[in-house]
């Protein structure tokens, strides 16, 4: 089973990750990111260049050993709303959950660049960085 992250309007109307935390397991190591927000696309002029709108942190410990998130298909004309996919780092054979932080870079139709790295919950304005959890495997 594929794990999905969607870019959706947050409570403030700005792009937010939903869910901000996803767990990958031995039998579902594929992650897919999709934009589900009108007027928003992946930022191909961001700090990491084209086709690098999703970036796993270099500070992750242990480091990410999965594939680099990459877009599926050819670059479109207009806003880039292609799916991004990555393969997970493999089974976690340790005893502790391992978390991997990442950032997503998007742009609106007017060219305003944004980094999506937090999600506001419905109950309280609590900033939470998006993470990928790799649960210990039996």
Image (spheres, grey):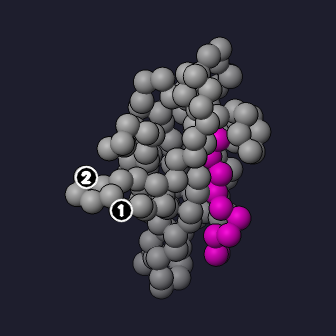
Q: Residue at the spot x=36%, y=53% of the render?
A: 120
> Where residue 77 appears, x then y in whole percent?
65, 14
Q: Position of residue 3 (x, y in %)?
A: 43, 49
- The residue that appears at 57% across and 41% down in the rendered structure is 114
Q: CA distance from mark 2 to mark 1?
A: 9 Å
Which of the numbered marks, if any, corresponds to residue 122? 2
Q: Secondary structure at mark 1?
A: loop
Residue 36 found in image quarter = top left
- Work out whether residue 124 or residue 59 is closer to the camera in this orientation and state it: 124
* Image quadrant assignment for residue 88: bottom right
Q: Does residue 11 appear in the picture of this structure?
A: yes
Residue for badge 1: 126
Residue situated in front as seen by the camera: 83 or 115? 115
Viewer can see residue 23: no
Which residue shows up at 71% across the image and 64% down it?
A: 58
Q: Nearer the viewer, residue 91 or 42?
A: 42
Q: Main secondary structure of the magenta part?
A: loop
Magenta stretch: includes residue 83: no
Range drawn in magenta: 53-63
């Amino acid at each position: 089973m594929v794990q999905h992250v969607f870019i959706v309007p947050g409570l403030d109307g700005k792009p937010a990750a939903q869910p901000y935390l996803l767990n990958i397991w031995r039998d579902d190591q594929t992650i897919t990111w999709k934009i589900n927000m009108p007027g928003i696309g992946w930022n191909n002029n961001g700090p990491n260049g084209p086709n690098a709108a999703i970036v796993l942190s270099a500070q992750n410990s242990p480091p990410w050993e999965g594939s680099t998130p990459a877009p599926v298909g050819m670059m479109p004309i207009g806003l880039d709303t292609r799916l991004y996919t990555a393969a997970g780092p493999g089974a976690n054979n340790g005893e502790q959950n391992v978390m991997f932080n990442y950032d997503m870079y998007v742009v609106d139709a007017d060219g305003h660049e944004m980094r999506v790295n937090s999600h506001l919950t419905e109950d309280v304005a609590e900033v939470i960085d998006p993470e990928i959890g790799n649960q210990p495997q039996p």
